[in-house]
Image: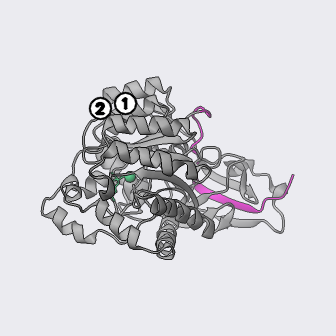
Amino acid sequence: SAPYSLLIQHAAQVLTMVGGPPDRPLAGSDLGAWTIIENGFVACVDDKIVAVGPMAGLDAARIGPATRIVEATGCVLMPGLVECHTHLVFGGNRAHEFERKLRGETYLDILASGGGILSTVRATRAASEAELLANALHHLAGFRRYGITTLEAKSGYGLDRDTELRLVRVAREAGQRQPVRVVPTFLGAHVVPPEFKAAGPRAYVDFMLREVLSDLKGEAAFVDVFCEEGAFPLDVARYYLEQAHKMGFGLKIHAEQLHDLGGCEMAAALGATSIDHCDYLTPAAAARIAQHTQGRTVAVLLPLVPLFLRQEVYAPAREFIDNGLPVALSTDFNPGSCPSKNLWLAQSVACLKMGFTPKEALAAATLNAAWAIGQQHDCGSLEPGKRADLLVLHVPSVAEIPYWLGENPVRDVFIGGREW
Ligand code: NIG
Ligand code: FE
């Protein structure tokens, strides 16, 4: 068999994320029970992982003159982070609303006054495609430094046909111009744009279904909708997702962020790949979702959002996990509710405010995040056959990862077997 092209060895801990059933995301006690290998290695041929194990099991015969050897003594070696929910492509920013928020205006107040998402829509429509691409590439470079190797990117700041298609195109183009893999999602139903204010949310989603979704086949795997007061009501969100499903799209929803409207249960019943936010989802509803979907719909939790919105209501993740609902973690990177790319900080806040253990948080930001965007065959764990997306961290143990609050523990980033 071929000599190794890359060998990372002598890692203090290798975090495999392996140990649960292979055909579904990690849930319940499996979430924190995956295997840690002490004094271990990962070996790769070209862009794929081919062997993972303790140093005692290393096949020295496969080390050749062309093998790149990286020493990870005293370090954690783990899969690249998977960022499964971002609004990567947008114009401008919302620094001007930060002080309004500090004075006490809420997220939905600012939106109702024509600001919030609508203010980013104006800035995004006014930006050129080249500017949007440059911004997206800047943010992707930041994500890469935090060890993110695969990232989902939603549209949703165009809210008209041309701009929404442009945002999906920019996300795909950005994915091709640098090493971080980009998975685009269509969030044309983010809020109702001014042009449809009189006609209403149902007329707007009919327009999206009629005029836009057919042009997205093969361009975006998922269709997402924001189900919330001031955005899309439950019945319209259901109708839209049902139609999108018939057209062959995978489904996602922003739901139970600020109120309990039943969006998560509705989307899960339609077979949604993920249900996102969930701060107001009850543990009882989470248990029903886990049962009805047989643990296949992932709840994507976004702990930096309540922090940044000064909301102080965090998803009851401990209960979700104990009730068998698979959970993932993400930043929700966007200009309004989370201008941070620090998925390590998100893990720390998940431990501090949502009841995660450090091991659970790591699985939620890798393997379960990969499931949440349909990338579980390619990434999220250290297993032969998966892409060689690997991180060497300058900490020696899992316990120190969420402990160094706000720090970036990344020493080296490998994507597809190459260092970046
Ligand atoms: O996931 N909640 C809706 N959408 C985004 C925020 C978008 C924005 O405020 O610009 C979110 O939090
Ligand atoms: Fe979001």
The spot of residue 5 in percent (x, y) is 77, 62
Which region is colored magenta?
1-23
Q: Is residue 58 above or below residue 317?
A: below
Q: Give me the residue at 39% from left, 73% from top.
A: 126
Q: Give me the residue at 38% from left, 31% from top.
A: 265
C-alpha span from label 2 to label 1: 6 Å
Question: Looking at the image, can residue 368 be seen?
Answer: yes
- Of residues 74 and 412, the one nearer the viewer is 412
- Of residues 203 and 329, the one nearer the viewer is 203
Residue 288's quadrant in the figure? top left
- Of residues 77 and 104, the one nearer the viewer is 104
Q: Give me the residue at 60% from left, 69% from top.
A: 178
- Of residues 334 and 200, the one nearer the viewer is 200
Q: Is residue 333 left or right of residue 6?
A: left
* Amino acid at circle 1: Ala
Q: Are marks 2 and 1 in contact (CB under 8 Å)?
A: yes
Q: In the image, which disc is placed on residue 286?
A: 1
Q: Secondary structure at mark 2?
A: loop
Neighbor class of circle 2 (other Cα within 10 Å; few <14, some 14-19, many 20+) is: some
Q: Is mark 2 within 8 Å of ligand 1?
A: no
Q: Give me the residue at 52% from left, 46% from top.
A: 222
The spot of residue 100 in percent (x, y) is 17, 65
Question: Looking at the image, can residue 273 be seen?
Answer: no
What residue did someone put label 2 on? Answer: 282
The spot of residue 244 in percent (x, y) is 50, 40
* Amino acid at circle 2: Thr
